[in-house]
Amino acid sequence: MRIVTWNINSLRLRMPLLARLCAETAPDMVCLQETKVPDALFPLEAVRALGFGHVAYRGMKGYNGVAILSRQPVQVLEDTPDWCARGDCRHLAVRHGSGETAIDVHDFYVPAGGDIPDPDENPKFAHKLAFVEEARHWFSARAMRRTVLVGDLNIAPLEHDVWSHKQLLKIVSHTPAETERLLAWQQTGFIDAMRHFVPPAEKLYTWWSYRNRDWSASDRGRRLDHVWVTPDLRDALRGMQVLRPARDWDKPSDHVPVIVDMDA
């Protein structure tokens, strides 16, 4: 089973890139974030034409939005919270398969948090911290098995998840307030599937700012996109790839797809 997670940064704008991704990587499931399309305008037929007969989505106009595209049947899990009571389409979960071999997949888009890393001065940052805390509490209360959590979590938690640990400690996405909370969420029952393949001492990025004119040469990246799995899926992991060339595609997202292969 090949799962791809990608902050596509507007699905309708980047449908040609989604088609290219599917042609080049042949995923079984694609989890998208920041689709930026209300449900009534979701390009369902275009997505089905790519071979995904089973599609779930939650979207709103202009902002946020998540979608899960699957070649095999999935069932939407309806017992998920309305995070921070905002109804802002940041989470979608499905069950792939049935019985003992079923896999639950959670697709998240965590708030970015604005520019000022102070919850008293910046309501967006306060929302981000509250969102991660709420997610930690919710998952800690559940006995999870055969679960995959993916998405743009908007936090680079480890030293080598950013181009300069020292320079970014006071920059939103790498502040201790965020990284400590994200790791606490992860510790509710997950392992870091990307770092299963790439040791923590090695640099690993999935996002490069549009502000960097030559993003590849400067390589000032951050790992904002993640794949976590429950320990009972550790031995099922077969491979992982950050599709770095996608950052040079025509009109790219500032995030690149992350591909994980696993037995399922």
Image (tube, grey):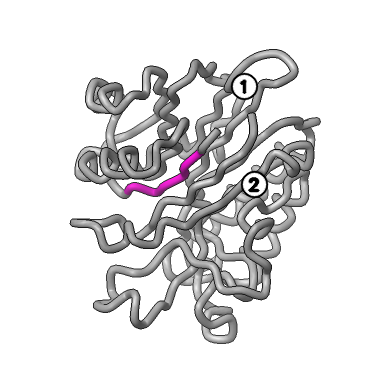
Name the one closer to the observer, 61 or 196.
196
Residue 178 within the segment the image draws in magenta: no
**Tag on residue 62?**
none
The quadrant of the picture occupied by the N terminus is: top right
Give SS at disc 2: strand
Number of labels in the image equals: 2
Q: Badge 2: how crowded within 10 Å, few (<14), some, or many (20+)?
A: many
Position of 109 with respect to 254 (left or right) is right
Q: Is residue 70 visible?
A: yes
Q: Badge 1: how crowded within 10 Å, few (<14), some, or many (20+)?
A: few
Sequence-wise, the earlier of marks 2 and 1 is 1
**Tag on residue 79?**
1
| Residue designated by label 2 | 228
- For badge 2, the amino acid type reads Trp
Residue 4 within the segment the image draws in magenta: yes
Name the one closer to the observer, 40 or 156.
156
The quadrant of the picture occupied by the C terminus is: top right
Residue drawn at the location 48% of the way across and 19% of the way down: 72
Instruction: Give residue 137's position: percent from left, percent from top.
Output: 73, 42
- For badge 1, the amino acid type reads Asp
Position of 239 with respect to 46 (left or right) is right
Residue drawn at the location 78% of the way across and 37% of the way down: 232
Give SS at disc 1: loop
Query: With respect to residue 73, does 143 lie above or below?
Result: below
Name the one closer to the observer, 26 or 225.
26
Query: With respect to residue 182, does 107 lie above or below?
Result: above
Instruction: Give residue 197's position: percent from left, percent from top.
Output: 64, 58
Q: Which residues are magenta?
A: 3-8
Quarter of the figure with residue 248: bottom left
